[in-house]
Image: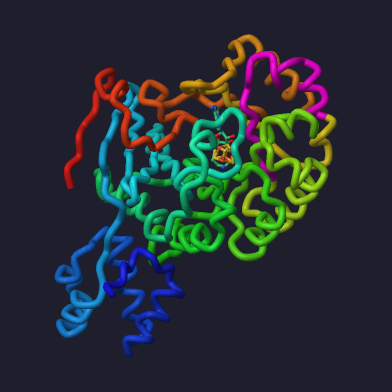
Amino acid sequence: MTQNLLDFDAQQMTAWFAEQGEKPFRAKQVLRWIHKAGEPDFDAMSDLAASLRTKLKQTACVTSPSVMREELSDDGTRKWLLDVGTGNAVETVFIPEETRGTLCVSSQAGCALDCSFCSTGKQGFNRNLSVAEIIGQVWWANREIGKDADGNWPISNVVMMGMGEPLLNFDNTVSALRLMLDDHAYGLSRRRVTVSTSGIVPAMDRLRDECPVALAVSLHAPNDTLRNELVPVNQKYPLRELLAACQRYLERAPRDFVTFEYVMIDGVNDSAKDARELIALVRDVPCKFNLIPFNPFPQSPYKRSSAEAVRRFRDTLMQADIVTTTRKTRGDDIAAACGQLAGQVQDKTKRTQQRIVEVSR
Ligand code: SAH
Ligand code: SF4
């Protein structure tokens, strides 16, 4: 069987090279070629012995998921639809800003958690992505966009906020995170890599112990009654337990706060009373809030909160000394905004309405 080397973090690469009778430093060289140089071709790995290059060509490959479609937003956001086989597709979104480039990465095809406001949840769960399929999104997007004039790759930040619940695909997500952090691969600081979770409490503890990166928690409601409805996994891990897990996480986190994401849904969770209840709820957790105006998708029962309601909600939190930002809606003209990623393979209506670049590889 041909081994896809994108499936290995540094430790796994070293173990595989040892099995082939090769020294650990060879694994590091290859890791650097693949991830730092973005090079998939063993023949181009000029500091490897010719015999090793031949052996790798026979036993290994470097293959990221193939891209079925690329879409460009008017605001510069780019979205790629990636084929992950057996009729499944996932989406990756690149969001350029003046001082950074953020890649929003998917961890699963679909999602089992069925949050009532999320289009990924509505399609159900298909399967976990492999390490190659997760890190392949970073690898591929870097190569596709290309280095800037100073020779830097465009991706400076990664957020695990695409499709799926990263902490329910724990091992593969952690291997991919390790590659993002590894100096022989992407060398991103822990503060620039964020895992967003709907609140899988035991996995939050494991992440803290095994690979602490910046943490975002999808809160969305100020009490269990409403959160049970919006984020059904709350029935398993209710707010008290979730907030305690956030506090434990902060003992080893690269940042001294948790980011709470809060989707703003008209008439559902956006009242002054909700804001006050929220302030009392998070009193003991050092945190920032990121308000995300609800992004509509077909068949969704909800409406986005008005700009005025979002502003008032933010002001109330700020007055309680909670740093609060409102997420700019980026890429919504190509359904690349939070919660709009669906990965449909068949989407003919959108095809005609949008500027679509067909990518054939
Ligand atoms: N499963 C993880 C990460 C992926 S979702 C999680 O739930 O945290 C990334 C963020 O987008 C989450 O905060 C999620 O709640 C939010 N989101 C989902 N659907 C949305 C929608 N329709 N509008 C705005 N935000 C949404
Ligand atoms: Fe899954 Fe996150 Fe969507 Fe909930 S919001 S269904 S956890 S992807």
- Give the image location of residue 57, x and y in percent: 19, 74
Image quadrant where residue 77 sits: top left
Looking at the image, which is closer to me, 361 or 32? 361
* Residue 157 visible: no
* Residue 125 visible: yes
- Is 263 inside the magenta-drawn segment? yes
Looking at the image, which is closer to me, 240 or 343? 343
- Give the image location of residue 201, x and y in percent: 71, 52
- Give the image location of residue 109, x and y in percent: 45, 46
User: Is residue 235 shown left or right of residue 83?
Assistant: right
- Give the image location of residue 92, x and y in percent: 39, 41
**Is residue 8 placed above or below 63 in the rendered structure?**
below
Residue at (69, 14) in percent of width and height: 267
Residue at (60, 11) in percent of width and height: 306
Quadrant holding ligand 1? top right
Image quadrant where residue 331 sits: top left
Looking at the image, which is closer to me, 336 or 88? 88
Looking at the image, which is closer to me, 327 or 226? 226
**Is residue 305 placed above or below 227 in the rendered structure?**
above
Quadrant in which the N terminus appears: bottom left
**Is residue 116 placed above or below 151 in the rendered structure?**
above
User: Is residue 175 shown left or right of residue 210?
Assistant: left
Residue at (27, 66) in percent of width and height: 33
**Is residue 300 placed above or below 163 in the rendered structure?**
above
- Is 323 inside the magenta-drawn segment? no
Image quadrant where residue 39 sits: bottom left
Q: What is the magenta range?
A: 257-279
Residue at (52, 41) in percent of width and height: 124
